[in-house]
Image (tube, rainbow, N blue to C red):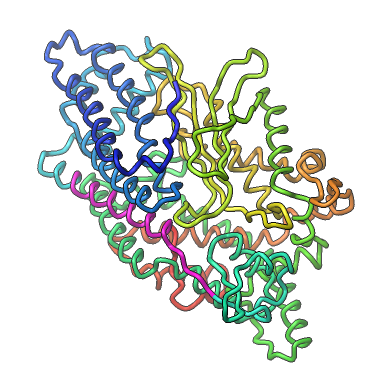
Amino acid sequence: MIRRPPRSTLFPYTTLFRSQRLIDSCRAAYERVANVDDILALDYDHVIRPLADAQCKYATGRSIFEFPQHSAVEKDVRDASTDAARSLQYFDVEISMRKDVFDKIQHFANNYNLNLLEPEAKRFILRLVTNGKRNGLHLSEEVREQIKEIKKRMSELSITFQRNLNEENTQLEFSEEELDGLAPDFLQSLEKLPSGKLRVTLKYPHFFPIVRKATNEQTRLCIETAYHSRCMQENIPLLEELIQLRQKHATLLGYPTHAAYVMELLMAKSPENVKTFLEELAVKLKPLWEKEQSIMLSFKEEECKKKGLEFDGRLNYWDCRYYMAMVEEKMYAVDQNVLKEYFPLHVVTEGLLKIYQEILGLSFSRVEEAPVWHPDVSMYRVENKADKELLGYFFLDLFPRDGKYGHAAVFPLQPGCLVEGEKRQIAVAAMMANFTKPTETKPSLLDHKEVETYFHEFGHVMHHVCAKAKFAMFSGIKVERDFVEAPSQMLQNWVWEKEPLQLMSGHYVDGTVLPDEVLEKLVKSQRANAGIFNLRQIALATFDQYIHTREKADTCKLFNKIFEEITEIPPIFEIGRAHV
């Protein structure tokens, strides 16, 4: 069984009707469980299996309606998908608060020897019980109603927050002089305006080259400020309302903070443990960052002298990526502009697919005339090489466009699990990225950081497609949160090894693989800038912990304070966080 995202041109006219039919079907399954009156009939076949089957059908059907908000070309399609997602998430809240169904589940769990079941079935039942308690189904009706309304509002805020980011389309204008330091092919790829200036967006293929290579400090300041101001006016009030609602939700459930509620199911177990970990790790990283900072400041001082500019003696926020790139070039002789010539997207894709097929014993074949939502999208069939078993399909959607999801991520479109407890349903996933588009004179070229991102995200695709869970709840990447990144983080290390890099490289002009001397320098640069990179991650994690251990927060002020305390870099004025 496979359901593929429909061609988006047909979507707006049927989306609400079809998504409501899916909701009605799932609701009916829950009603049947709730209406089991005979205590002797409260068994696996009348309680647990119907819920598992309903979850499978619901998870399979909903992606058809939710995914286009992140991928569709037409705005009316994205709007229709957003409306459908809102209805589906409201229904998620409804079924999560079904005390009558929860009572049936708990009765079965309390009166049946779960050890007689297969381990995954036992885990499914225990997770249903845990989720029910964490939804407050053991509390009074009055409290449950409050929780239900809070969850609905949180869903609404989250959908609107992400929609604002997807639809964001800020455009800036720079002269060629203001973009000094950028490669000629990059400048040629930009739209030239009647004024003679060049149009720049905040999407990755424009943003990262400019902040890493523009020699003009004001240009870097301008684009960094614009990037970190995305949707601030719309999204900061949403985030700050979410913080208050999450705390109120946690309080109603008996937890001291939202962070404590979340940590209960994670390895860290408590916000206190997380705080200790982050603080201790930051202390250990500070000496490394001090060395890195000293080197970057020496580069900045040298550059200021050459340009006859005053040296301010500090690294500004808009300096960081620029001097991090300079460290790679001067200390490791790694120039991403030179490297990318060896990583045409089609060559990287061919090598990446070959590596994953070899490692995992798989066979990929491209599906011609596939039902895709944009001409740039490709679809592949995945089989087990040994016995030709069909495991699933995946889509690759790799270039930016207006309204598309702005980062790199994998979206599970169909869970790989058992249908009605017997027949296996294949898995389907879509990988979204925002790599530089090809031009008339050059193919799409990736820098090595993008190659690593590609390899990492494709690891999630393989995790989703190859998993053999029986229940939709545990299918693919729906694993414990502490583990979800582990396979990809492990697999992405192949991009730092000689053989895989040679398989994924070939100069776009003559096809020569990455030279050994360049490869060796690249591998040595793996730990370059590790101090500031990891301190930045600690700052983000600390911010997350702070805002979710209090009733409300001035997020801009708090982020600025935390970031400067941890990294010693003054943030851009009123920087905020556009994506949390």
Q: Which residue is nearer to you in this view: 173 or 501? A: 173
Position of residue 471 measured from the top left corner of the image (x, y, whole percent): 40, 22
Q: Quarter of the image for the N terminus: give it.
A: top left
Q: Which residues are magenta?
A: 148-172
Q: Is residue 448 visible?
A: no
Point 31% across, 53% down: residue: 257
Q: Which residue is nearer to you in this view: 151 or 210? A: 210
Position of residue 222 measured from the top left corner of the image (x, y, whole percent): 55, 77
Position of residue 248 measured from the top left corner of the image (x, y, whole percent): 23, 54
Point 74% across, 69% down: residue: 184
Q: Is residue 298 visible?
A: yes
Q: Quarter of the image for the C terminus: give it.
A: bottom left
Dominant SS type (magenta):
helix
Point 15% across, 11% down: residue: 39
150 magenta-colored? yes
Position of residue 418 measured from the top left corner of the image (x, y, whole percent): 42, 18
Q: Is residue 499 above or below residue 184?
A: above
Q: Is residue 422 above or below residue 346?
A: above
Q: Is residue 104 above or below residue 38?
A: below
Q: Which residue is nearer to you in this view: 275 or 483? A: 483
Q: Is residue 235 left or right of residue 307?
A: left
Q: Is residue 63 left or right of residue 516?
A: left
Q: Is residue 496 left or right of residue 192?
A: right
Examine the image and state in which quarter residue 21 appears: top left
Q: Is residue 98 above or below residue 323?
A: above
